[in-house]
Amino acid sequence: MPLLTPSAVHIDQPLTNLTIAFNQEPSNFIADQVFPVVSVPKQSDKYYVYDKDASNRTGNVKKLAPRTEVERIGMGISSDSYYAEVYGLGADFSEQDIANEDTALEIRSQQAFDVVNQLKIHREQAFADTFFKAGVWGTEYTGVANADNDTAPEVTQWSDYTNSTPIVDITTARRAAFLKGGGFEMNTMVVDVETRDTLINHPDILARLNGGATVSNTALITNAKLAEIFEVENFFVMKAIQNTAAEGLAASNSFISSKKAMLVHGPKRAGMRTPAAGLTFCWDSIPSVSGMGITVESFSDDALKRQQIAEMIQVKMAYDMKVTGANLGVFFNSIVA
């Protein structure tokens, strides 16, 4: 009599406690962290802006003689507006898909994750296109090879470990923006992965660690440590990636941005008389499940059933990213070779 084999006593089945998916980590996305998110009840509206130079102006205060009147000053007020565009993406499931689905697959839940991830990537691209680029901020530097004089608009690229001085560059930029912006600290620094990787191996950074760092005396350089070195409250790394290949072709993954750095003044929350380099206006009249107004809906109706579609999901978000204080930001372009 033949011996039993594994295939004779067991038919392979999908595991019910394990599946593998490839949605990016939430920490890769920074678009909803750098600037305050303002929830708004209407898709469009206006907001008031006070004269940014008025409160620091000197020369109006006078010594008063008895029974004389004080000097009077005026007030400059303007307005700006936002318009929250609605963005969306969806997916559907046929009656056969739902009927044949293995329990472990949870195709509706996973498809929702995929759709949300693509919307997050789109939002991150919008952040880069609005804030993380040249020509936006009041103070701007360009990285070049062997800059003769590290003052705006040129500095030596930080990948030049012999001649560049990233800590000095940031200190100089913070001081310039403090003056231009009316006395507000640049409390947030944003870089991309390539720039961060360049910084953590820079001799100037390693020298600032306790006791220094060498090949034999290594050190873990965290974002919190970089925030301390550059004297900012927040240090964000733009890590989200995008696949620009069409469906069915080999993946073409790349970072959304590279070789850049940015300093901005970003308060913890927006409010009355609160300056900010930028804001994101999120239209909250669409029910949302996150601070950036991401809405996930699932529905079925007769029109779908006539197409043998059992269920459809759609994900939407509505926002407008605005530069609200150009002089409260500094940008470094091509800062890595």
Image (spheres, grey):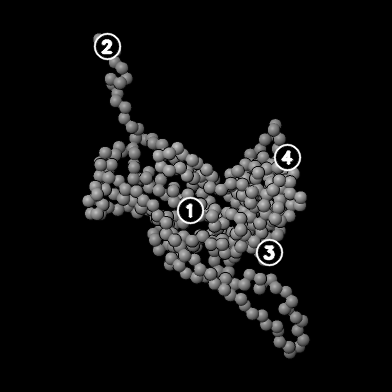
Residue 32 on image: x %, y %? 51, 54
Dot 3 surroundings within 10 Å: few (below 14), some, or many (20 or more)?
some
Dot 4 surroundings within 10 Å: few (below 14), some, or many (20 or more)?
few
Of tags 4 and 1, the one toward the viewer is: 1
Residue 154 on image: x %, y %? 70, 52
Residue 211 on image: x %, y %? 73, 39
Q: Residue under circle 3?
A: 180
Q: Residue under circle 1?
A: 123
Disc 1 on helix, strand or loop? helix
Q: Residue under circle 4?
A: 211
Q: Earlier in the sequence, mark 4 or mark 2?
A: 2
Q: How far is mark 4 from mark 1, CA to CA?
A: 41 Å
**Quarter the N terminus occupies:** top left
Asked if disc 4 and disc 3 are in contact, CB closer than 8 Å, the reply is no
The residue under the point 60% across, 59% down is: 136
Vertical side of 250 occupied by 154: above or below: below
Q: Is residue 209 visible?
A: no
Q: Residue under circle 2?
A: 2
Q: Earlier in the sequence, mark 1 or mark 2?
A: 2
- Of 7 and 122, which appears nearest the observer? 122
Amino acid bearing label 3: Lys
- Residue with the most extreme bottom position: 67
Amino acid bearing label 1: Arg
Q: How far is mark 4 from mark 3, CA to CA?
A: 36 Å
Disc 4 on helix, strand or loop? loop
Q: Earlier in the sequence, mark 4 or mark 3?
A: 3
Q: Earlier in the sequence, mark 4 or mark 1?
A: 1
Disc 3 on helix, strand or loop? helix
Vertical side of 82 occupied by 67: above or below: below
Asked if disc 1 and disc 2 are in contact, CB closer than 8 Å, the reply is no
